[in-house]
Each structure stands twice: as C-alpha cells, then as structure tokens.
C-alpha cells in the first residue's frame, strides 16, 4: 500500500514538469515531508471545458482518500486511499473514475515500514524507510479522482457543497521497495501521461496496458527518522538517516 509520502515541489515546478495550463494560486499547498490520508494533495488532471471541444490540463488540490459519488458519508474516504491495480477497473468504488476521471499525483518518494526487533529490549518496532527514484526525479503516481455532493448542503454554489477526492493506484512492489513491503504506488512514465490523463479515452483495456510495474533499478530505499511515524511531525529532518 501507500499510506504516507513526500511532496515538496512547488506548484510552479509542477506546472512546468507536467505542462499544466490551469492553476489557481488560491490552491497553493505547503511542502510536506509527511503527507497523510485526508490531507490536501496536488493532482494533475485534464477536464473538457463545457460547451467547447477543448481539454485543459489542471493542477488541483484534492483530498487524499476517494469518496465515491454514491457514498452516504465522506468519512468512507479514509479507507480508500489506495486502489489495487489488479481490480481497480471493476471495483464499484473505482470503476467509473477509472473510465473517466484519472489523475497523476506527484511525489518525491513514499514511506513504508519494516518490523525490526530491538536486540536490547526484545521488542519489535516499525522502522520507516524512504523509497524514492534513484535519479531524484518526481514520481508521477497513477491516481483517480471523484466528485462527491454533500447532501447536508442545500445550494450548489456553497463551497462546502462539493468535495473532490483522490486515490493512489498500487501494484506489486519491485526493486528496493519489494524488500520492505509487498505493495507500492504505481508510477507512470512521461510517455504515458497524455493517454492516462485524457478524459476522452475510455477504453479500459488500453488504460490497463499503461499500468505496468516499473523496471528494476529505479528505486532506492533507506531507513529514516522514527519521527515519521507520527503524522503530526513534518519537515526535511524526517529524511535524516535512522540512528
């Protein structure tokens, strides 16, 4: 799974890297070295403009944890932070978004935990590892997004009427990630961005063909500060080597 990650690049960098055309400065997020479920996160997506044959690429701030449009309560999103690549195309919670609402979630890297037995105390602790591209490039994690209408709000113009949420697609772990945890986020390569984001592309077989496991040798994993374990902690110091 992917339950925590880092996202520290500026929106200016992201708009350049992903050729974004639309971004609202009001949605600027602070850099985070400890992104957790239900946090606001950056997402790159494409939408067709109403009454126009035009698709625009946007950088948006979405809440991590997908809430299906038919959900009765938004709290369900905290349990839908990941979608398995093996079943994402036909699971009721994800299949409509897979066909119509796909996105990329940029990250510097992600965290996984390995149980480690303390030789002194005999107790087992959870050692966090930071797993990231060896070349330092951004990870474009494949994701889905969805709109949810809050039934407790009357008017559509109310800012609380609509909630836009997202989930990360995961796959079997390879490379260094596989030594720490059996699952990992599925990152796409730049040559697949356009097809994945295009809202006019609905062929699920073609889309599933894009979701292949990354080649070995692209990820590094290293133990980092135990401070990562507390979601309230944040800052570059979280990536310090474990002591």
Image (cartoon, helix red, strand yellow):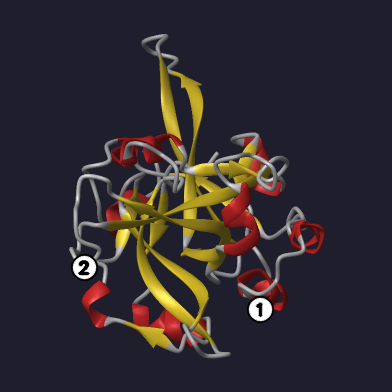
Judge whether 159 appears above or below 13 on screen: above
Residue 165 position in % (x across, y down): 40, 54
What crowding class fits label 1: few (fewer than 14 Cα within 10 Å), some (14-19), or many (20 or more)? some
Judge whether 101 appears above or below 149 on screen: below
What crowding class fits label 2: few (fewer than 14 Cα within 10 Å), some (14-19), or many (20 or more)? few
Residue 118 numbered tag: none
Q: Nearer the viewer, residue 181 or 134?
A: 181
Residue 44 position in % (x across, y down): 48, 72
**Can you identify the residue that label 1 sits on?**
194
Q: Is residue 146 left or right of residue 62?
A: right
Residue at image position (25%, 81%) is: 25
Judge whether 121 appears above or below 14 on screen: above
Residue 155 position in % (x across, y down): 20, 60
* SS type, badge 2: loop
Q: Is residue 65 left or right of residue 171?
A: left
Report if residue 23 is visible in the image. Answer: yes
Distance CA(mark 2)–CA(mark 1):
32 Å
Residue 157 numbered tag: 2
Q: Is residue 97 left or right of residue 5?
A: right
């Amino acid at each position: 799974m992917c339950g925590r990650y880092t996202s520290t690049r500026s929106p200016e960098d992201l708009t350049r890297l992903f050729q974004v055309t639309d971004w609202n400065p009001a949605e600027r997020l602070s850099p985070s070295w400890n992104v957790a479920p239900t946090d606001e996160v950056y997402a790159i997506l494409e939408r067709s403009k109403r009454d126009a044959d035009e698709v625009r690429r946007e950088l948006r701030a979405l809440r991590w944890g997908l809430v299906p449009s038919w959900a009765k309560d938004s709290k369900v999103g905290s349990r839908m932070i990941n979608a398995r690549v093996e079943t994402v195309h036909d699971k009721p919670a994800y299949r409509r978004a897979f066909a119509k609402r796909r996105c990329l979630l940029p990250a510097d890297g992600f965290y996984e935990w390995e149980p480690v037995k303390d030789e002194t105390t005999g107790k087992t602790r959870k050692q966090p590892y930071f797993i990231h591209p060896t070349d330092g490039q951004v990870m474009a994690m494949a994701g889905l997004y969805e709109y949810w209408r809050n039934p407790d709000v009357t008017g559509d113009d109310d800012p609380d009427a609509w909630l836009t949420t997202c989930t990360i697609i995961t796959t079997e772990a390879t490379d260094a990630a596989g030594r720490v945890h059996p699952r990992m986020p599925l990152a796409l390569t730049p040559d697949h961005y356009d097809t994945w984001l295009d809202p006019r592309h609905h062929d699920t077989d073609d889309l599933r063909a894009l979701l292949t496991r990354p080649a070995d040798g692209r990820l590094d994993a290293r133990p980092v500060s135990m401070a990562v374990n507390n979601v309230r902690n944040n800052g570059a110091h979280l990536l310090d080597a474990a002591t």
